[in-house]
Image: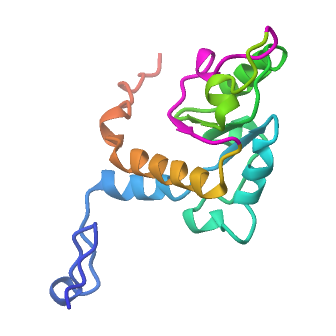
Amino acid sequence: MKTTTDFGYDSRVEGDVVHTRLDAALNWFRKNSIWPMPMGLACCAIELMGTGASRYDISRFGMEVMRFSPRQSDVMIVAGTVTYKMAMSVKRIYDQMAEPKWVIAMGACASTGGMYRSYAVLQGVDNILPVDFYVAGCPPRPEALLDALMKLQNKVQREPLLATLKKPGPALAPA
């Protein structure tokens, strides 16, 4: 029985030492500590709340800490109908989130305006925010949201983290 993991660890050969790339370790930490910002605007918010319940157990993926502060959130889950009256508030909250940040459009209304073709409803949140994943349904099941969150984890795992970090500039000499 071979005991190799994604990090290239083989307990028969290496004992208690784990060898990995710094990128892989940091991305593993990041992907298992994504904190959602729930933006529940309509009926899809009930399914979003159901995802956090014990039956679906979002904590298995390290995402159980729903943050209602944009400065502590990594992914905004827009669940429901976005009206023009609410659109600028959603955009403002997104702008307050720290980088890196992602957006999931949950449900037909958040994705395309749904069945509401009126002057008051924004025809898709992607008109004001860069959406990373769309969750289909009216309303979508919690399993569909979990699938989108797992796809987000895979996206975070593949990001070249160290290449994007900025190196500090030269130290300033005292005058």
The one nearer the camera, 174 or 75, is 75
Among the 4 quarters of the image, the one containing residue 90: top right
Residue 50 shown left or right of residue 25 in the figure: right
Among the 4 quarters of the image, the one containing residue 65: bottom right
Among the 4 quarters of the image, the one containing residue 88: top right
The one nearer the camera, 139 or 15, is 139
Report x, y in % for residue 156: 42, 46
Report x, y in % for residue 70: 72, 35
**172 relative to 23, above or below:** above
Q: Which residue lies at the image location 58% right of the left edge and 52% below the top edge?
A: 144
Query: Which quadrant is the N terminus positioned in?
Result: bottom left
Q: Which residue lies at the image location 66% right of the left edge and 47% below the top edge?
A: 140
The range drawn in magenta is: 119-138
Residue that extends furthest to the top in the rendered view of this protein: 119
How many badges with numbers are in the image? 0
Q: Dominant secondary structure of the magenta stretch? A: loop
Q: Say if the magenta span includes residue 17.
A: no
Q: Which residue lies at the image location 75% right of the left edge and 34% below the top edge?
A: 80
Residue 174 shown left or right of residue 118 in the figure: left
The one nearer the camera, 123 or 172, is 123
Report x, y in % for residue 127: 60, 15
**19 relative to 109, above or below:** below
**90 relative to 127, above or below:** below
**39 relative to 15, above or below:** above
Q: Which residue lies at the image location 58% right of the left edge and 21% below the top edge?
A: 126
The one nearer the camera, 69 or 84, is 84
Residue 42 shown left or right of residue 104 in the figure: right
Report x, y in % for residue 24: 32, 55
Q: How is the image coloured?
A: rainbow
